[in-house]
Image (cartoon, helix red, strand yellow):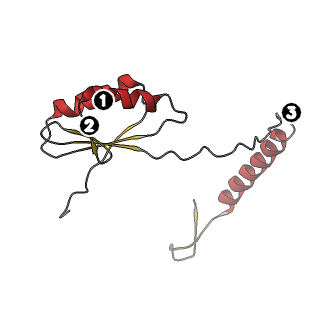
Amino acid sequence: MAFSSDQDGGFTEPNVVPLVDVMLVLLIIFMVTASVSENVKVELPKATVDARPPAPKVPPITLSVREDGSIFWADEQLAGKEMLDQRLAVEAQKEPQPDVLLRADSETKYALIQDVTTRVRVAGMRSINFVSEPESGS
């Protein structure tokens, strides 16, 4: 941007005429391209909104695994892993399927937790969620 000078050789004000010329050219370019894009005719598809009833809420299944390997279905201790497999097979057939919430003691061995999650997956359950406590002192 050029500056005009006075008689003493100092600059007093900028010459903004070239800046205004560039801005007007840009304005004309934007106006032309905006009018061209509106002339393109497109036949948009019609959308139909299907009013579906909301899916019924299904209470989740809470499985708890203790450090000693005992497994609980909600508050009921299961006699063995076969009983867990049977109950999971029944729940997997329901539509919609309930979520599985898996709780485990902090000292439970990973192999026990992996065994339960594998049994849940083999039964055909689609959603396994791990329950934990938030860390304290953070």
Disc 1 marks a residue whose amino acid type is Met
Circles 1 and 2, Cβ within 8 Å, touching? The answer is yes
> Where 133 falls versus 99 (above or below)?
below
Considering every residue shown, the one lying at the far top of the view is 122
Crowding around mark 2 (Cα neighbors within 10 Å: few <14, some 14 to 19, many 20+) is: some
Q: Position of residue 108 (x, y in %)?
A: 14, 40
Quadrant of the image occupied by residue 109: top left
The residue under label 2 is 78
> Where 8 falls versus 62 (above or below)?
below
Q: Alpha carbon of mark 3 to alpha carbon of mark 1: how far?
A: 59 Å
Considering every residue shown, the one lying at the far front of the view is 79
Viewer-nearest of discs 3 and 1: 1
Which of the marked residues, 1 or 2, is nearer the chain's N terminus? Answer: 2
Crowding around mark 1 (Cα neighbors within 10 Å: few <14, some 14 to 19, many 20+) is: few
The residue under label 1 is 83
Q: Position of residue 25 (x, y in %)?
A: 74, 50
Quadrant of the image occupied by residue 101: top left
Q: Position of residue 117 (x, y in %)?
A: 30, 31
Which of the marked residues, 3 or 2, is nearer the chain's N terminus? Answer: 3
Disc 2 marks a residue whose amino acid type is Leu
- Secondary structure under tag 2 reads loop
Which of the marked residues, 3 or 1, is nearer the chain's N terminus? Answer: 3
Q: Position of residue 67 (x, y in %)?
A: 13, 41
Q: Which mark is residue 43?
A: 3
